């Protein structure tokens, strides 16, 4: 059976051919679709007639077999092969595109590199903005990174060097400024950062027999306000022990004399306490010490401990 159908209009002596397609012994009429308002006809853009710049009046007539995008005036085909600097609306169907500040679309790159233009960020890796362009996020950990902070580490910007430093996982004193440990409350000491303390116990002088005065050396106070000092005497000599609290600023140590004792004694130095006997309303500085002098050369056996109180 042949395609098409012949119709003869005998009254006017004309022959008409209606387009048809013969399939399995049956004929299916072939129809050309057009759209438009009353009194107008706009042809549908078909598979073989796909082109750019389709008029807005054809919006409802864009072929289903082609992906079209509006460019602000007309409709353009979505490309299969990605290229850069395509006009608005000409975004590739098979590629991830980003719009640049000039209004054009550019393909997202497949490779990894630093200093990428903001409209060319690779899709295969995480990127961070460095203030001018985009850098890869590193997989390793290192200090003084200028660009591309690692993804698996917390980093802090060091304004002094203009680079990034890892936030240490451990908590240490003397941490350089700009690298504060994760989750650690820190206090600035004028040079670096120290861990914030609670109350601390210190052994100032070990148990020993002494015939002369003794000095506990410099103690570092991080954030305590006062101190409780205990002298524990196990063997007393003659005379008395003459203790003093020492504090150092930028010069020599200054002494706060404490009451003399001939036995085990407790001293409390803390701001705001009622001052009487062995209680002193005072504070301790960052660098402090404790000294025990003697009234004679007899042997005393004792130990000295301290509790720094926040």
Image (cartoon, helix red, strand yellow):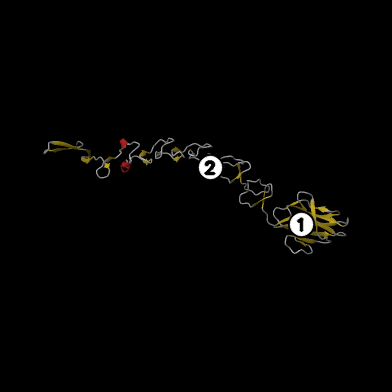
195 relative to 256 in the view: left or right: left
- Residue 47, how many percent across, how many down? 31, 37
Q: Quadrant of residue 41?
A: top left
- Disc with the residue nearer the chain's start (2 vs 1): 2
- Residue 297, how many percent across, how many down? 88, 55
Look at mark 1 in the image and give the residue it sits on: 305
Number of marks in the rendered image? 2
- Secondary element under disc 1, as helix, strand or loop, is strand
User: Farthest left residue?
Assistant: 11
The N terminus, quarter of image:
top left
Residue at 77 percent across and 59 percent down: it is 230
- Secondary element under disc 2, as helix, strand or loop, is strand
Look at mark 2 in the image and give the residue it sits on: 128
Note whether 27 is above or below 225 in the view shown.
Answer: above
100 relative to 159 in the view: left or right: left
- Residue 121, how many percent across, how many down? 49, 39
Note whether 240 is above or below 95 in the view shown.
Answer: below
129 relative to 76 in the view: left or right: right
Please tell me the numbered disc located at residue 79. Answer: none
Which marked residue is nearer to the observer: mark 2 or mark 1?
2
């Amino acid at each position: 059976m042949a395609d098409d159908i012949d119709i003869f209009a005998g009254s006017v002596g004309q022959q008409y051919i209606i387009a048809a397609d013969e399939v399995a012994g049956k004929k299916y009429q072939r129809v050309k679709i057009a759209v438009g308002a009353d009194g107008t006809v706009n042809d549908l853009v078909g598979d073989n007639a796909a082109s750019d710049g389709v008029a807005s009046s054809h919006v409802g007539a864009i072929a289903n077999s082609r992906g079209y995008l509006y460019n602000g005036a007309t409709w353009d085909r979505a490309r299969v092969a990605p290229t850069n600097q395509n006009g608005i609306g000409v975004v590739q169907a098979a590629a991830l595109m980003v719009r640049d500040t000039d209004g054009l679309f550019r393909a997202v790159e497949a490779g990894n590199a630093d200093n990428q233009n903001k409209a060319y960020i690779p899709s295969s890796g995480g990127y961070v903005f460095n203030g001018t362009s985009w850098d890869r996020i590193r997989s390793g950990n290192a200090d003084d990174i200028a660009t591309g902070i690692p993804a698996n580490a917390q980093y802090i910007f060091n304004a002094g060097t203009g680079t990034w430093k890892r936030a240490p996982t451990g908590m240490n004193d003397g941490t350089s400024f700009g690298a504060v440990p994760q989750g650690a409350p820190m206090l600035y000491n004028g040079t670096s950062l120290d861990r914030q303390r609670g109350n601390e116990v210190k052994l100032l002088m070990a148990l020993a027999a002494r015939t002369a005065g003794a000095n506990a050396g410099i103690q570092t106070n991080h954030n305590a306000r006062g101190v409780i000092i205990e002298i524990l005497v196990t063997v007393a000599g003659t005379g008395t022990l003459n203790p003093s609290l020492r504090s150092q600023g930028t010069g020599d140590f200054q002494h706060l004399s404490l009451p003399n004792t001939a036995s085990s004694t407790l001293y409390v130095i803390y701001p705001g306490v009622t001052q009487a006997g062995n209680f002193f309303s005072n504070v301790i500085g960052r660098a402090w010490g404790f000294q025990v002098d003697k009234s004679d050369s007899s042997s005393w056996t004792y130990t000295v401990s301290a509790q720094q109180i926040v």
